[in-house]
Amino acid sequence: MNCTRDIDYGPWAGGANKGIMARIKMTEVEVAVTELAEINDDERWMQYAMTLALKAQEEGEVPVGAVLVLDNQVIGEGWNRSIGHHDPTAHAEIMALRQGGSAVQNYRLLDAILYVTLEPCVMCAGAMVHSRIRRVVYGAADAKTGAAGSLMDVLRHPGMNHQVEITAGVLADACSEQLSAFFRFRRSQKKALRLAERAAQAGDIISDNPKE
Ligand code: ZN
């Protein structure tokens, strides 16, 4: 007995097309499940990238984190280290791509997906094109320097010999808040420092004044 005959395919599938229609239906379901799984994975990996961004913050760097994933496995991690490394190229994405290349022993990172908490800059977008990654997923958009559609679109430029798929705005609010909180904190630190310096200067003037 063929078990598939017992399945109720619904009124849309009948006669000679029954088997084909069933396969089409199954394919649609599988695609939908895959898409849902990818969306969930995207959020999960973005959360992971946010934890890497915290490492940057702990080192006094702008909190941007990136994770490079191939076949659902981490092959590279990165966070902003430009200040600490005295290296203008030490962005989170570059660090993750370098580690990924080293992990797979190949400068081409075909089919890899890069998750980054902030829209990549021109340099990082260029490196992604060179690496041939399949897709980039970013959190917060960057209107001033974003090269994945905000300021310009390097990744999908028609003249480029490789196009990188873009998924924008995954956990955008959380990623944006992580950056905003950092800049708020840094502004308050600078203000406190200025006030302390002024107070110290005022103290010096008072103590230097012979009439006092
Ligand atoms: Zn960058």
Image: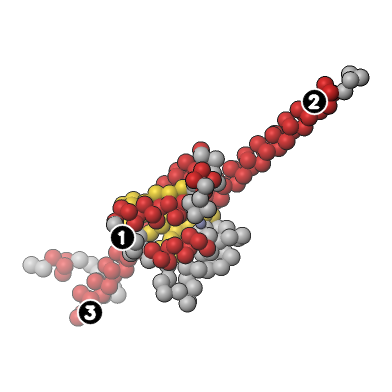
**Whole-percent x, y for residue 84 in the image:** 51, 43
Residue placed under numbered mark 3 in the picture: 17
Residue 19: quarter of image: bottom left
Q: Is residue 172 visible?
A: no
Residue at figure coordinates x 34%, y 57% from the top left: 101
Residue placed under numbered mark 1 in the picture: 106
Residue type highlighted by circle 3: Asn
Discs 1/3, front: 1
Q: CA distance from mark 3 to mark 2?
A: 92 Å
Please tell me whether residue 185 is drawn above or below residue 21 in the rendered image: above
Residue at figure coordinates x 55%, y 61% from the top left: 146
**Whole-percent x, y for residue 120 in the image:** 51, 59
Rendered image: mark on residue 204? 2
Decide if ligand 1 comes within 8 Å of the CB at mark 3.
Answer: no
Discs 3/2, front: 2
**Mark 3 near mark 2, Cβ–Cβ under 8 Å?**
no
In which quadrant will I find the C terminus?
top right
**Whole-percent x, y for residue 46 in the image:** 44, 51
Residue type highlighted by circle 1: Asn
Discs 1/2, front: 2
